[in-house]
């Protein structure tokens, strides 16, 4: 399918190399970057617990235009500082072609959000970049539509694509989305690309993040991405699904055990 070389990401100092397919990938951090203190505190905590990539949105796609939509350029500056201080590679979302250059300066991985999975002009521009891209599954995308979107990126030359299952909309409305666990082995088999599971957006419920993270790893995911916040109740976005530092640490211990038996 896509002639992918192994995706390798270096920490800012170059000391640590993370290789998809070889290492247990754990991406963690807040939904949105809210302040320097919030991001630094979260990064230090998740790193101590074993996360190897920091996440944090500066440009946030929000359902309502009245919701907090990220600190934008200021958020990127915070992300850049925290990246250096903690020596963690970072991932952040690109929503608009016009922001690519600015985000490229800071991000180690470019994230395409669920709502933009079929924004073909954005996919084409991302395909021209020489940094890895994580393509989240569209809100209601079929497996085939999702793969076609990866092909749009690859067709422009960027074959360093990571697929992210983040739940899809079904009739079941107890959870925010329905996590499609079977998509993990299916995508791996059909594309050979690495797959990351995002149980935070898939469930929308803090207490369901750990069981779905564990299930994803057993199903063959290369890693997970979860939202973590110093004070989830105070979060400006997605607090209900954000883990506390302690919950994240507990989950990481279980992930380690599961990795060993897999
Ligand atoms: C995110 O991961 O920051 C996000 C907005 O998720 P999604 O695009 O899957 O809704
Ligand atoms: Mn979120």
Image (cartoon, rainbow, N blue to C red):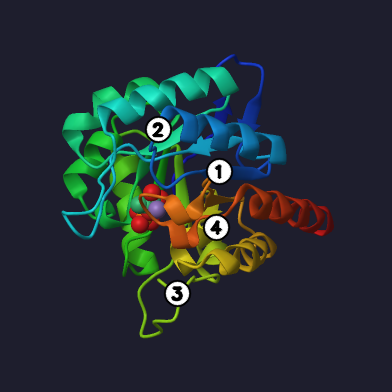
Residue 186 seen: yes
Q: SS class of the residue under badge 2?
A: loop
Q: Nearer the viewer, mark 1 or mark 4?
A: 1
Where residue 185 appears, x then y in whole percent?
58, 64
Which label is found at residue 106? none
Residue carrying label 2: 35
Residue carrying label 4: 188
Q: Is residue 79 above or below residue 224?
A: above
Counting residues from the start of the chain, the first of labels 3 and 2 encountered is: 2
As measured in the structure, the alpha-carbon distance from the residue carrying label 3 to the one carrying label 2 is 31 Å
Q: Nearer the viewer, residue 140 or 256?
A: 256
Left or right: 211 in relation to 250: left
Counting residues from the start of the chain, the first of labels 4 and 3 encountered is: 3
Task: Please give the name of the residue rendered at 28% of the width and 35% of the height, measured from the top-left corner.
Answer: 71
Q: Is residue 101 above or below residue 68?
A: above
Counting residues from the start of the chain, the first of labels 1 and 4 encountered is: 1
Check if mark 4's residue and mark 3's residue have beta carbons within 8 Å: no
Q: Nearer the viewer, mark 2 or mark 4?
A: 2
Badge 1 crowding class, 10 Å Cα cut-off, few under 14, some 14 to 19, many 20 or more, is many
As measured in the structure, the alpha-carbon distance from the residue carrying label 2 to the one carrying label 4 is 37 Å
Residue carrying label 1: 27
Q: Nearer the viewer, mark 4 or mark 3?
A: 3
Where residue 155 appears, x then y in whole percent?
30, 41
Which label is found at residue 178? 3
Counting residues from the start of the chain, the first of labels 1 and 3 encountered is: 1
Counting residues from the start of the chain, the first of labels 2 and 4 encountered is: 2
Q: SS class of the residue under badge 4?
A: helix
Task: Please give the name of the residue rendered at 39% of the width and 82% of the height, measured from the top-left corner.
Answer: 173
Task: Please give the name of the residue rendered at 78% of the width and 58% of the height, measured from the top-left corner.
Answer: 258
């Amino acid at each position: 399918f896509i002639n992918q070389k192994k995706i390798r990401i270096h920490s800012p100092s170059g000391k640590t190399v993370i290789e998809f397919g070889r290492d247990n990938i754990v991406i963690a951090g807040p939904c949105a970057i809210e302040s320097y203190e919030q991001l630094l505190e979260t990064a230090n905590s998740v790193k101590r617990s074993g996360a190897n990539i920091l996440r944090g949105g500066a440009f946030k796609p929000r359902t309502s235009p009245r919701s907090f939509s990220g600190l934008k350029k200021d958020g990127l500056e915070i992300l850049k500082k925290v990246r250096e201080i903690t020596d963690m590679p970072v991932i952040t979302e690109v929503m608009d072609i016009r922001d690519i250059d600015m985000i490229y300066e800071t991000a180690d991985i470019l994230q395409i959000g669920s709502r933009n999975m079929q924004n073909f002009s954005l996919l084409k521009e991302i395909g021209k970049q020489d940094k890895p891209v994580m393509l989240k599954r569209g809100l209601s995308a079929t497996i085939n539509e999702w793969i076609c979107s990866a092909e749009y990126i690859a067709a422009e030359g960027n074959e360093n694509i990571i697929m992210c299952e983040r739940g899809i909309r079904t009739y079941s409305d107890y959870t925010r989305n329905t996590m499609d666990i079977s998509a993990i082995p299916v995508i791996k088999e059909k594309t050979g690309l690495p797959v990351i599971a995002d149980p935070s957006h898939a469930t929308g419920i803090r207490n369901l993040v750990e069981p779905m993270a564990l299930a994803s790893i057993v199903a063959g995911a290369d890693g997970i991405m979860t939202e973590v916040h110093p004070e989830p109740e105070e979060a400006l976005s997605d607090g209900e699904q954000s883990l506390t530092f302690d919950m994240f640490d507990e989950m990481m211990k279980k992930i380690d055990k599961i990795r060993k038996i897999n």
